[in-house]
Image (cartoon, rainbow, N blue to C red):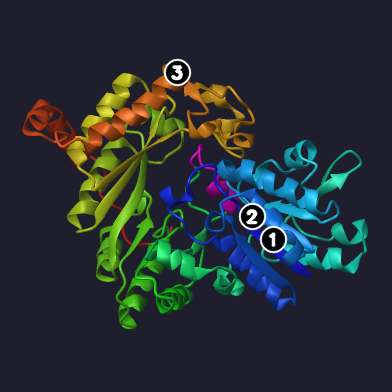
Amino acid sequence: MRVLFVNPHYTHDPGTLLLHPPLAYGYMSATLKRAGHDVVHLDLPFEGNSVETLSSRLDDIRPDLVGVTSVAQSYYHALEISRAVKKWRSNCPVVFGGPHVSFIASECLTRHPSVDYVLLFDAEDSIVELAQALESGAGVTALKKVSGLVRREGGGAATTAPAPPEMNLDRYGMPDRSIFNMANYLAYDYETVVMTARGCPSRCTFCSTTIAGRTARWNGAGHVVDEIEAVMDMGFTSIFFGDDTFSGDPQRAVAICEEIKRRGLEIPWTSNMRAQDARPKVMEAMLEAGAYRVFVGFESVQNKTLRMVKKGTSPERLYKTAKRIMASGLELHASFIVGAPGDTPDTLAATMDYIRLVNPTVATFNVMEPRPGTDVFTNPQRYGIVIPDRYWYEKTTWLDQPVCCNEDMTVEEIRDWVNRCYDTFCSPDFRSPEEMERISDIGKEWEEAASRVQKHLPLVSP
């Protein structure tokens, strides 16, 4: 079978974004090829950034199956792709997958006739099962044996139970990057992404990607460093580890760092990290192995908000962790949600003072986007959140304004505060002597509060 994977286009110029190859396609390509299937990838952001590019290529590619993965923000464009395929050939099957559609599979099939199937969660094995079922021509009988498949049946949707999460991620091997035009990515950015884990030990109520991962799972250290060498051989000179938390298993994180040093690899890299995973021994090992910055989701500096969204930390612990990260020699990229449950103009002003005191290298400010699969989306009233449009991800209005608001801030106020936060943080006067003098007493309070926080955990696996 010839399987075509399509990387969705964007409404705006993709050159303004951080573009990395969609490794989910690479992993599925590897298993499909091992099973004897042919795989083609069409990278729309690099090839016209338009669904018309796909339409013009279908006669040449002539796929037997088209697969599209998407997050909430690319779902609108994924639907455009499915309609273009059906316009080309109505009987060409289209399958969707990914962390977004896994939670709205029945809704997707009911609302969008251009989508034939949805594969839930990890799809390296189930995409092969689907391809073989379609190729066999055995119809529904064969489809019922495809794990994690959602299909139409009797005016509704029928679901086959997904396989248990694969705990031995090394079994999948490396993603097949040969289906991507890596020269395009290398010309665009010297940095590329490597994934070394799935899932997350946390269960924040606003995050769907950790739920989609189902449970925290890790690649072995040797496998990870083999992949680092592979992308270095392609010419990339920096790596971003895209795991939800690179150091969620601290012993494995240290083992990766030691293996990087043992092989004599010299490449700078960044990673995501939960605040509670910022153990001194881990950060020391990371720094020695080439790490220069970590991304930490602070989200809020309000105790009530952090408890509500089950962040598993406190403002005091976050403050102490930030200081510890920067004292280790690593740069800190701190991320905050604007319009989170409990946010008000006063709490956001206090957040900016908190950031003045912490002084991270980079700070980013994102609006709350309730996504299917999360408790915030399912029970917004529990969080004081209002979602005016239940199907916000089927549109592109989220590009212009937030998709939700809270009890104290309107959509417009949240949008304006995002701009205000960025303008303030980027201002040359952000940490002027006058500002720092103004908050000197606040700083002493935070230092005292942080000193009362229990010291970091010992280096043990969770």
SS type, badge 2: helix
Q: Is residue 133 above or below residue 276?
A: below
Query: Is residue 116 visible to the viewer in this orientation of the structure?
Result: no
- Frontmost of labels 3 and 2 is 2
**Quarter of the image with the C terminus in it:** bottom left
Amino acid at dot 2: Thr
Residue beneath disc 1? 57
Classify mark 3: helix, strand or loop. Answer: loop
Earlier in the chain: of badge 3 and badge 1, it is 1
User: Alpha carbon of mark 3 to alpha carbon of mark 1: how far?
Assistant: 44 Å
Q: Which residue is mark 2?
A: 53
Counting residues from the start of the chain, the first of labels 3 and 2 encountered is 2
> For numbered disc 1, what is the local secondary structure?
helix
Residue closest to the far front: 56
Task: Residue 238: give x, y in percent of width and height.
Answer: 35, 67
Taking the image as shown, residue 10 lies to the left or right of residue 294, namely: right
The magenta span reads 204-214
Identity of the residue drawn at 61% across and 71% down: 172
Residue named by callout 3: 410
At horizontal 73% and vertical 41% (from top left) the residue drawn is 108
Callout 1–callout 2 Cβ contact below 8 Å: yes
Neighbour tally class for label 1: few under 14, some 14-19, many 20 plus, Cα within 10 Å: few
Tell me how far mark 1 sits from mark 2, CA to CA.
Answer: 6 Å
**Visible in this render: residue 380?**
yes
Q: Amino acid at mark 1?
A: Arg
